[in-house]
Image (cartoon, rainbow, N blue to C red):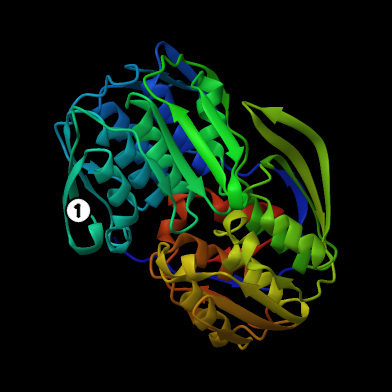
Amino acid sequence: MTPRPLQSRQTGSLSGTVRVPGDKSISHRALMFGALAIGETVIHGLLTGEDVLNTAAAMRALGATITRDDHGVWRVRGVGVGGLVEASQVLDMGNSGTAARLMMGLVATHPITTFFTGDASLTKRPMARVTTPLEQMGASFVSRSGGRLPLVIIGTENPVPITYRLPVASAQVKSAILLAGLNTPGVTTVIEAEPTRDHSELMLAHFGATVKTERIEGGALAVSVTGEPEITGKTVNVPADPSSAAFLTVAALIRPGSDVTLTDVGMNPRRTGLYDTLIEMGADITFLNRREQAGEPVADLRVRSSELTGVTVPPERAPSMIDEYPILSVAAACANGTTRMLGLAELRVKESDRLAMVADGLAACGVAVEAGPDSLTVHGAGVPPGGATVATAMDHRIAMSFLVLGMASSQPVAVDDSEFIETSFPGFVELMNELGARISAPEA
């Protein structure tokens, strides 16, 4: 794949009303759960980035019928819980850790053999955190060291329900175990010390599965699914992705005179840590027209430029904003004072070592920053110098974050490759420029 560098230059105010693409986490799940349902699932607003299209292709290979009409409505005719068939080809999950880990849970309790691979970034990411509990349920794996892709899963004919305590807060691991539990007799339970995204639980309940969440001794949450349900096809309206909306939100906050409205944004309380933090920093964000879609809270966001002040972000907030720390770091660089972000160890095993990538990129752009093993401290000074080309390591969130930084910097900021933005936010550059940004190919 040929690198596609981009450059962002300081702009004036941003204005307009836009809808960012559909939520990636919910889009993956809508396709997967629809494939396990009896009857037809109709999906509106599905994200059509490469990651989600890879999930659609994988579910077709496993037996589901998936189509998209001329109006962008997707229809999934499922095979029922336990009805997945053995794929005749390797399932390529591209850049998506979510898709890979959830799919591994889906097939682990089916008596089929499934081969997984991914792109150069995904094959570096740890999968042992998923294979360990799935092995306890009866599946077998052959993989590279650390459970890394490519790997093969030999699903079990006689799955065993487990109770598993997550060693690290991870919605992906939790979801993989719950999805494996769907085709397992009895009750499968995941215990999490800190609440993580609950999209799987909400959507499973929407499709008719029995899901229970309760507080247990020590304050942990026990999330259980009753196996072998008959779930039925549903209509799913995918909200706009709050992680994608985050880039436009921060861009509007740091450009004087900006006034931007983002419609239909998912406001699941386990995804809104960034917005809570920005408001603590002084952000002018108004939540309008609050409502619910397929069990998920949704709102329109009006964002106006604001003077931001540095804050300390507590470690317990990390699960609700783990993907948003790169763009929060941009807001911190444009704020007055110091922002300290704690509990960030998980960032080191994302699409890249995001903690190191953010720190290196900010330093290259003249921002004072210190990175610890699980922390990041950014000393904001209003207008960053910029003037650097930032390495992205095939990470879409790093690329988008530094393009936003360039909109506020004294000198342009370039990224060495933007190709992978399409995996999660198709049309990002066009949408930003529609609001008033100046993102283009670097000047010769």
- Dot 1 lies on which element? loop
Residue 382, position as x, y percentages in the image: 77, 81
Quadrant of the snapshot with the N terminus: bottom left
Where does residue 399 sit, x and y in percent of width and height? 50, 66
Return the residue nearer the eye: 86 or 200.
200
In the image, residue 188 sits, relative to residue 73, either above or below, namely: below
Tell me the residue at 60%/61% (across/down): 318
Residue 312 vs 82, above or below: the answer is: below
Residue at the spot of label 1: 150
The answer to whether residue 124 shows anywhere in this view is yes
Residue 247 % position (x, y): 64, 58
Q: Who is closer to the viewer here, 348 or 379? A: 348
Residue 191 shown left or right of residue 265 in the figure: left
Q: Is residue 306 left or right of residue 72?
A: right
Please tell me whether residue 32 is drawn above or below residue 331 in the rendered image: above
Q: Within the image, what quadrant is residue 322 found in? A: bottom right
Quadrant in the rendering for residue 139:
top left
Residue pictured at 33% horizontal, 50% vertical: 130
Residue 219 or residue 358, whichever sits in front: 219
Residue 443 shows in this picture: no
